[in-house]
Amino acid sequence: LTIAGIELREVNKPLKRPFKTSLQTVEERESLIVKVTDAEGVKGYGECVAFSTPWYTEETVVSSRFVIEKVLVPILLHQSLKHPGHVNRMFQQVKGNRMAKAAIEMAVWDLFAKKKDIPLWKMVGGEERAIPAGVVVAADPEKVEEQVAEAVSAGYSRIKIKISPDSDLDMLAGIIRKYPNQLFFADANGAFAEETFDKLLELDQAGFTLIEQPFGEQQWQLHTKAKKAMNTAICLDESISSIEDVQRMIDEQAGDMIVLKMGRLGGWSEALKVARLCRTHSIGMWVGGMIEFGVSKAHNLALASLPGITLPGDFSDSQHFWNEDIIIPEIIVENGEIELSVESGIGYQVKL
Ligand code: OSB
Ligand code: MG
């Protein structure tokens, strides 16, 4: 298969309501969509999940556009590929910039699945099953209860609440007690520190299934200390940008499970390797969201179909963050689940 064209499109939409994390309040989402075309005109799509500013990782929309256009496109354009896994190897000469690499790489995996006329989830070894949907509540404290109630009535089986050392844990524990059949995750985005370690320990009483990234991405020793001291599972998100990081988490007993994010890992090849390693070591994993549009969501649904991914990920429907998505059909949550598309590739048409 020959890569004949690579194009970038920018999407920009205001969020229905502000998304408030311990690091940043997101009010508008700007993303780059990558379209790769082969010599016969078949198209594959990827989405760059870098944000407008470097608050979650170092990459930004502007930096990834630069790297894609000036560095990655010249490496890939007009090349002939036998397997989508080769893209990752071709990009190894470029340091970092994993979200930029992932965006193109994802598009090539979609293109290969379309050429084979099979769903991407099937091509990567996924299982044919509905994907459990989870939503994230990232609101001001006074709105958390109302948004949890909304999420429950919308049928979500898992609710993730953004927290920080300033969170009112009694209030959160009260909300969690009201919904005994619901799974609750907490995500701190690295907001805790040595000085607030005791506050983290109190979280054990609140009823969360897991706590995502309590400390900063390089705070391996604090995570080890927390895993030893707590009953609530420690789940690493920002700390995991490669398979080596997962190995380090295992070696240092720094966490119980990980959030799989294709963008943060540099694409499908690395995500598949990481998933395999986690299965080998019985490390729990689930697919994390990035306030993304439908192209990234569609790739994530395929990722979530892999064996061993049992916990519900960040999968809200297409209308959760904005009124209109960029894919047809839109993603819908029914009975707390999302059906995998049976169409080829990512399984959705892209409206760009
Ligand atoms: O830490 O998981 C995170 C969104 C943007 C950046 C980081 C994170 C998130 C989320 C997921 O919490 C939101 C979603 O459902 O897309
Ligand atoms: Mg997170």
Image (cartoon, grey):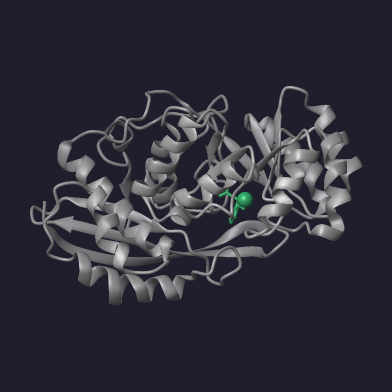
Whole-percent x, y for residue 160 in the image? 68, 41
Question: At 20% from the left edge and 64% from the top edge, which residue is drawn?
Answer: 76
Q: Position of residue 6 (x, y in %)?
A: 22, 64
In the image, 25 versus 256, the foreground residue is: 256
Direction right: furthest residue: 170
* Left or right for 211, reference 44: right
Name the side, left or right, on which 167 lies relative to 190. right
As drawn, 104 above or below 177? below
Which corner quadrant of the image does residue 226 belong to? Answer: top right
Total marks in image: 0
Q: Nearer the viewer, residue 9 or 243?
A: 243
At 8% from the left edge and 52% from the top edge, which residue is drawn? 40
* Residue at 87%, 49% in the rendered image: 199
- Name the foreground residue: 313 vs 95: 95
- Residue 174 in the image: x percent, y percent? 88, 35
Residue 324 visible: no
Q: Residue at x 42, y 50 (%)?
A: 296
Location of the C terminus (image quadrant)? bottom left
Residue nearer the viewer, 146 or 193: 193
Q: Is 177 situated above or below 164? A: above
Residue 201 drawn at (x, y percent): 85, 43
Q: Quadrant of residue 165?
A: bottom right
